[in-house]
Image (cartoon, rainbow, N blue to C red):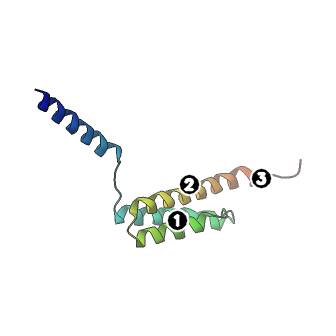
Amino acid sequence: MRKLMITLMAATALTLAACASGPKHTAGDAKGAIAAAEHETSRAAKKFYEWRDTKKLIKKAKAALKKKDYDKAVKLANKAKKQSTLALQQYNEQKNAGPH
């Protein structure tokens, strides 16, 4: 009975550890995230509202993709896309701003 209990506890611990590690991204995921970030960044560039670090993040995401660190590539690309989305939001909020 004791061996069964220890085995069940070990199996539960391994299952929880596997669930906690989260999903692993693929090369396709990373390429898609980078493409989405580049698209959003080009939209911000057309409005002359690019943020300073966005292209650096995309460059780092591409480097991570080359190193086959797909999780890092997706994380960086998503951050770059978010920055470009926020830059466009900032543009829309401030495009009609003038002196008070």
- Residue at the far left: name it: 1
- The answer to whether residue 44 is left or right of residue 96 is left
**Residue 43: percent from left, percent from top:** 59, 64
Which residue carries the number 2 mark?
82
Say what secondary structure mark 2 lies in. helix
Q: Quadrant of the N terminus?
A: top left
Amino acid marked by disc 2:
Lys
Please, is residue 88 above or below residue 52 in the view? above
Nearest to the observer: residue 17 or residue 2: 2
Tell me, for residue 49, which label it has, or none: none
Please, is residue 39 above or below residue 1 in the view? below
Say what secondary structure mark 1 lies in. helix
Which residue carries the number 1 mark?
39
Which is more N-terminal, label 1 or label 3? 1
| CB under 8 Å between discs 3 and 1 | no
Which is more N-terminal, label 1 or label 2? 1
Image quarter for residue 7?
Answer: top left
- The answer to whether residue 60 is left or right of residue 66 is right
Nearest to the observer: residue 90 or residue 65: 65
Nearest to the observer: residue 7 or residue 75: 7
Amino acid marked by disc 3:
Asn
Mark 2 or 1, closer to the camera:
2
Which residue carries the number 3 mark?
96
